[in-house]
Image (cartoon, rainbow, N blue to C red):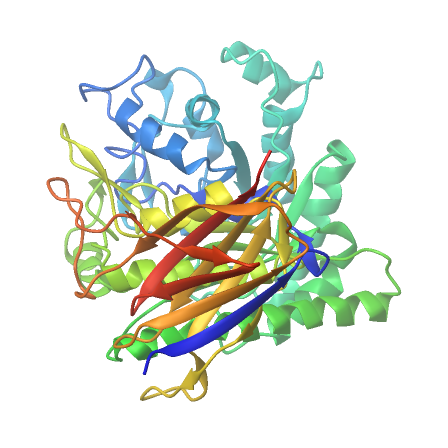
Amino acid sequence: MTKTSRLTINKSDKISDIDDRLYGSFIEHLGRAVYDGIYEPSHPSADENGMREDVIDLVKELNVPVVRYPGGNFVSNYFWENGVGPKENRKKRLDLAWRTLEPNEVGISEFVKWAKKVGTSVMMAVNLGTRGTADALNLLEYCNLDTDSYYANLRREHGDKKPFGFRLWCMGNEMDGHWQVGHKTAYEYGRLAAETAKAMKMMDDSIECVACGSANIDQPTFATWEKEVLEQAYEYVDYISLHQYFNKKDGSTEDFFASIDNLDTFIDTVSSICDEVKASKGSDKTVYLSFDEWNCWYHTLAEDDERMKNDPWGLAPHLLEDDYTFEDAIVNGLALIKFINHSDRVKIACLAQLVNVIAPIRTEKEGPAWKQTIYYPYEQASKYGRGTALKAQITTGKHNTDIYENVSDVEAAVVLSKDEEQLTVFAVNRLTDEDTVLEVELNGFEGFKTVSWQALESDDMLVTNDADNERIKPVDKTVILENGVLKATLKPASWNVIVLRKEA
């Protein structure tokens, strides 16, 4: 007998307006993300700045609202001055994080031109590993100020007359990680982040600052790190970061799908810490969450470690180029559902990364660019997930996996568009061997009719896409809507996007 899940949607039952930056991404100077990724002057599609137009077109389809740059681990030994001005004068440097050569052919100005072309904004990061407050201020002046002062004038000399106007700034990266160049204790980092954010806002009070939270929920200092950092920096920062990568390890597909529920614990715990510190300080400001690194990442870990150990200091080596499977796409869809349902606290999220490096877009040198399996949940969430998150009141069955108990069969999120004329239901059937009938009761949506239902489906959990064959892509389905109740049979292990619009 086919299982049934019931979803009740009330138009007035709102979670939060969704910040568009929930669908952000990330480009780091790592592997082939920049060089041979977005930038390849010899490519047939290269524009006047050496940027690949075929990649630009794929990024435009995603409608990415913000891109975090230039790191990641790379930023903790980042000398931004080496990537500005005439290219013939730029210094090549060794990147300690990924043990590669950084030619600095792409720097701030080139990246800004690319960002404008794809229609995104830049989430800039400052080096709080090997540098500090003074260098952060120099970078901010160079990027944002229109004053008659040294670094603002230097930018003009370099050909950028108008300021870049970056509004969102990361105060370093993963400073709790022992792998980080310039790793610090929570107190050391909290003081540095506080003083840097305070000084930067004295220079430009329009910016927002993101403090480093734990590198992941499994860090031994998780929670105590967040509390100490916020005790020091609460009044000067606007967000605290969360990072998490999903890893199948040796578990089953069912375990992999269930593991995403750890996001609820992660988000709720950090939110509670923020509120505890807010209360202890008697503050009227709420610090929100920036989930500025997330993705599946596990396919190439051993290979990458071997390459960095035995073949260091290469230019744009193949690093972190995971070939994503169908089940990875489902896990990413589940993560996007979690972010939507926590949009009252998670205001920014960045899929890490965008091109080649653990990315939805892959390229071949001198060859094509194509969409990996994980491209589609991200693209559809970005397209249909803007507006207001409504509470998805779902009654669904439960199942156990080898590792997890009481796992919901169906996970769902609901978004009402900004004009309140379109309603989207995102749903994943986590059962791997059974269909599920999803019944959706609509309250307050008179005159709404189904427009489309697209799904990602496969009998092969490990199937991938490549340059020659897009095996996984959305398929059109038919949904029934009668008397205010929508019915759709969700295939096993499927990602589903159902769109309704109000008739004119």
Compared across the picture, whether 469 is left or right of 359 comes to left
Q: Is residue 463 above or below residue 405?
A: above
Compared across the picture, whether 155 is left or right of 465 comes to right
The residue lying at 35 percent from left, 87 percent from top is 403
Percent x, y of residue 458: 21, 61
Percent x, y of residue 214: 54, 66
Q: Can residue 75 be seen from the camera position used here?
A: no
Q: Can residue 189 be seen from the camera position used here?
A: yes
> As drawn, which residue projects farthest toward the left?
468
Quadrant in the picture for the N terminus? bottom left
Percent x, y of residue 314: 19, 42
Q: Is residue 77 above or below residue 414?
A: above
Compared across the picture, whether 113 is left or right of 56 comes to right
Percent x, y of residue 167: 64, 35
The residue lying at 47 percent from left, 41 percent from top is 383
The residue lying at 33 percent from left, 78 percent from top is 2
